[in-house]
Structure formats: C-alpha cells, structure tokens
C-alpha cells in the first residue's frame, strides 16, 4: 500500500530507545551501561554485571552485598516444580525443558506476575536471575539420569551453578576456581546484546502486558534457533565434523558456494562487521580452561585456530566482513568445562536472562511504551467471493 516502510529482518528499524547496551559494529565495541565488556570481563563478576544492567550503575560494596544476598535467597525452586520434570522424556532437549519450565514459573510464583506493581516486578526479576540456573542444572541432571543437586548459598553464582551441574551425592566435589571464574566470565560476555532476536521477542511479548516469566520463556524459545543462540552448539558440531586441519579448505569452499546452504557456524554477525570483542575474550578464556584441565594439544582448538586463520585471509570472508563471533570459541570452552553440546544454548539462556529482564524492565517503566504491532505489505489475493464446496472445481 506504500504507507509502510518494508524492512525485512529489521536491518534499519530502531524499535526502541535504550540506555542499556551499546554496540559499534564497525569498531567492534560493546559497552554495558557505558562500561567496555573487556573491563567488566576482566575485573567484574556476573552478579555485579546483573546489577549494572538492571539499575544502570555499578553497585557500591553495600549494594553488591545486598543484591548478592537477595539473589541467593531465591535460588531454590518450588518443590512441586522439581516434580514437574518427571513429565518430560529423558531424551528431551534441555532447551525444550527450559522453555517449558521458565514459562511454568508463572504458574508457581503468582505473587510476582502483576507487572503494574514495581515490587512484584523486582521480585520476579530476582527470582529469574536466581532460579534459571537452578532450572538449567536440573534439566541437565534429569537428562543424564542423576539426582538433582540443590543450590548451596554460600557459593558464588558460577561456582554454585557448576556444582549443581556436576556434583553427585556419592562423592566429594570441589569446583576448580579457575573454571568457575571462566564460567562467570562466559555469563558476563553473554549477559546482554541490545535488540537481538530473542531480546526483541521478549520486548514484543512484554509489550502486550504478558507476565515476565512468560516473556523470558518466549526469549528462550527464540534463542534456541541455530542462527542465534544455537550457533555455539552448531559451531562445535561443525568443528567436530571438520575433524582435522587438512579438511578446512573443503569446508571453506562449501561456505563460499552460493548453491550450498552450508555456513561457517560461529562466523558473521548482523551488527559486527569487525572482530566480535566477546570472541577475543572467549578465545583467551578457552586457552585458560584447556590449560587448567591439562589439555595441551586439543584437536578441536587446533581446527578452530586454523579455520580462523584461513577464513581471515580469504577474500570472500574479508569482503563480506565475516569475523568469528562469540560462539566460535564458546563451544570448545563449554565442552572443556564438561558440558555436552545440548547444554550450550541453555548456558547462553542462563546468562542472557538478566539482559532480557533489564530490557523488559526498561520497556515496562517507559511511560511512552505501547503494544508492539508491526504492519505488513499485503501481497495476497484481492477481495473475492466465497464459493460453495459443491461448486468448486
Ligand atoms: N558463512 C558463510 N557465509 C556467510 C556466513 C557464514 N557464517 N554468514 C553470512 N554469510 C554470507 C551470506 O551468505 C551473505 O552472502 P550474500 O550477500 O552473497 O548473499 C552475506 O554473508 C550476508 O549474510 P546474511 O545472512 O545476509 O547476514 P545476516 O546479518 O542476516 O546474518 C548471521 C547474520 C549471524 C545470522 C549469519 O552471519 C550466520 O548465519 N552466521 C552463522 C551462524 C552464527 O554464527 N550465528 C551466531 C551469531 S552471534 C550470537 C548470537 O547473536 O546469537
């Protein structure tokens, strides 16, 4: 009709104003509330990052202690919720369980679903930051047939999460502080990324006034796709399929072939037309983790480094500005931490929960907020009359 601007994939449409995250894709810059991701990943911790994303400032010592205490207070899930896991098949993908169980939080925590009440919004936010890791660890334990491990509240966020995933009742389990620091850094790197597909999904769902648990479940569903959060799983599968550096040219040729749908997973980004700053930190973290667990010469890491070298000197990738993104090295790192590939996107969801909540909160608290309602360019049939079934040929 010509009244609307057609912008498939929203490449040039700003859907909101936001003060939370800034990306300069040409420079390869990522800031949370103005702070460079490199500094937060180096000096900060995840809960401090959560506070920053939610409230706009780094916490003072007292604010941090109070926030940590309040999140920790909410880590356990309703016991009835634990039983709900039994309804799933053991071989269900943990992301399927995540979508269902985070959505189900609205059934268990009615007292924090009234979005008009700031106190309820705050409690819902704390509950999700605290309980999503517990649900993720339970999804993993259920999948592998082990008993759930309850949260331990004198541990920090990442250490508690690793313990819930990997401890078993029959033996002692100590979390290696280097691995827990790596996990924490992975959470920081994934915490927010402005108006990506899942965050936009959360905002759109939230714009109708849906409760926050339902909105975050919608975000998790969107994140699952291989072009988004599913890329870390796909990247690791690809590196495994490539197997040896000798086979790289074959896969690079396929990625460049217009008639082959194959893409180099972990390469390219809608916004970054330069090296993804998170990928650099992830690469360093990957080396640290492998060194700590005593892997000297990891075949997958060798394939990844060689693939990166080949792609970054190839005209096709240079011309299209395709650089490694965060998912390129995160798969190897998560595997080294002990997670199976099916858990990779779940870990992304755990980390991104705070970003989704911060964006949802910003939207709800914006007085100019209206329901999101994109328009379309109709390309279907013009008006026509109904034909009775007996008269149709
Ligand atoms: N391998 C080979 N060619 C590629 C790749 C790739 N990974 N990514 C993009 N291209 C080509 C694409 O074929 C297209 O070529 P042409 O202009 O000749 O048609 C051009 O580059 C632009 O690609 P696009 O699909 O139009 O770009 P987009 O902004 O719509 O998509 C993307 C961005 C991330 C979905 C895409 O680069 C991709 O599929 N990458 C692989 C999946 C991946 O690693 N995703 C993780 C993204 S970062 C984490 C997150 O946000 O969740």
Image (cartoon, rainbow, N blue to C red):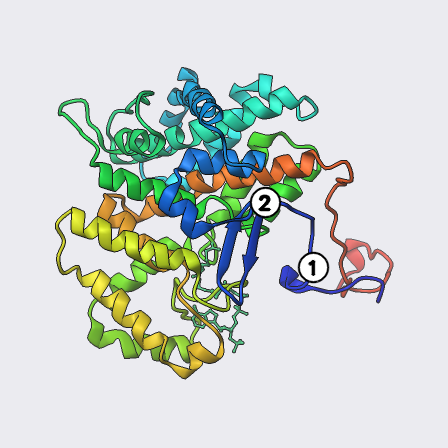
Q: Position of residue 385 (x, y in %)?
A: 87, 58
Q: Nearer the viewer, residue 36 or 328?
A: 36
| Badge 2 residue CB within 8 Å of ligand 1 | no
Q: Nearer the viewer, mark 2 or mark 1?
A: 2
Tell me the quadrant of the picture where the N terminus can be found. Answer: bottom right
Would residue 97 be seen by someone viewing this image from the given angle? no
Residue 335 x, y percent position in the rendering: 25, 49
Q: Residues within 10 Å of mark 2 (few under 14, many from 20)?
A: many
Distance Cα–Cα, label 2 vs label 1 = 18 Å
Eyeballing the image, is 238 above or below 160?
below
Q: Nearer the viewer, residue 93 or 62?
A: 62
- Give the mark, 2 or 1, whose residue is nearer the N terminus: 1
Residue underneath mark 2? 20
Tags 2 and 1 in contact by the CB under 8 Å rule? no
* Whether residue 83 is visible: yes
Q: Residue at x 36, y 31 (%)?
A: 157
| Res. 13 mark | 1
Left or right of residue 388: residue 197: left
């Amino acid at each position: 009709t010509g009244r609307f601007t057609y912008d498939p994939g929203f490449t040039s449409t700003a859907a909101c104003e936001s003060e939370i995250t800034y990306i300069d894709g040409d420079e390869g810059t990522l800031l949370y509330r103005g702070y460079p991701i490199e500094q937060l990943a180096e000096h900060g911790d995840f809960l401090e990052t959560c506070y920053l994303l939610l409230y706009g400032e780094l916490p003072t010592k007292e604010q941090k202690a109070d926030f940590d205490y309040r999140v920790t207070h909410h880590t356990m899930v309703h016991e009835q919720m634990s039983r709900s896991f039994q309804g799933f098949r053991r071989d269900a993908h943990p992301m399927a369980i995540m979508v269902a169980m985070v959505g189900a939080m609205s059934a268990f925590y009615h007292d924090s679903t009234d979005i008009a009440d700031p106190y309820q919004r705050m409690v819902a936010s704390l509950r999700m930051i605290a309980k999503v890791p517990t649900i993720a660890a339970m999804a993993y334990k259920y999948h592998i047939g082990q008993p759930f491990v309850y949260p331990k509240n004198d541990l920090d966020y990442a250490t508690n999460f690793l313990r819930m995933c990997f401890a078993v009742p029959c033996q002692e389990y100590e979390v290696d502080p280097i691995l827990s620091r790596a996990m924490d850094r992975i959470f920081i790197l994934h915490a927010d990324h402005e108006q990506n597909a899942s965050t936009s999904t959360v905002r759109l769902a939230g714009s109708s006034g849906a409760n926050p648990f339902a909105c975050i479940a919608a975000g998790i569903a969107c994140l699952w796709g291989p072009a988004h959060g599913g890329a870390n799983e796909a990247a690791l599968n690809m590196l495994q399929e490539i197997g040896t550096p000798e086979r790289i040219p074959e896969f690079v040729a396929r990625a460049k072939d217009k008639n082959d749908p194959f893409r180099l997973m972990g390469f390219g980004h809608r916004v970054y037309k330069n090296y993804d700053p998170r990928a650099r930190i992830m690469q360093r973290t990957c080396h640290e983790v492998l060194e700590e667990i005593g892997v000297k010469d990891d075949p997958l890491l060798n394939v990844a480094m060689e693939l990166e070298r080949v792609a970054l000197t190839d005209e096709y990738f240079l011309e299209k500005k395709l650089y490694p993104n965060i998912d390129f090295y995160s798969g190897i790192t998560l595997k080294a931490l002990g997670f199976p590939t099916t858990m990779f996107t779940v870990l992304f969801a755990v980390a991104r929960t705070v970003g989704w909540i911060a964006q949802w909160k910003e939207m709800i608290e914006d007085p100019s907020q209206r329901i999101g309602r994109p328009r379309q360019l109709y390309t279907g049939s013009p008006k026509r009359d109904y034909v009775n079934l007996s008269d149709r040929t």
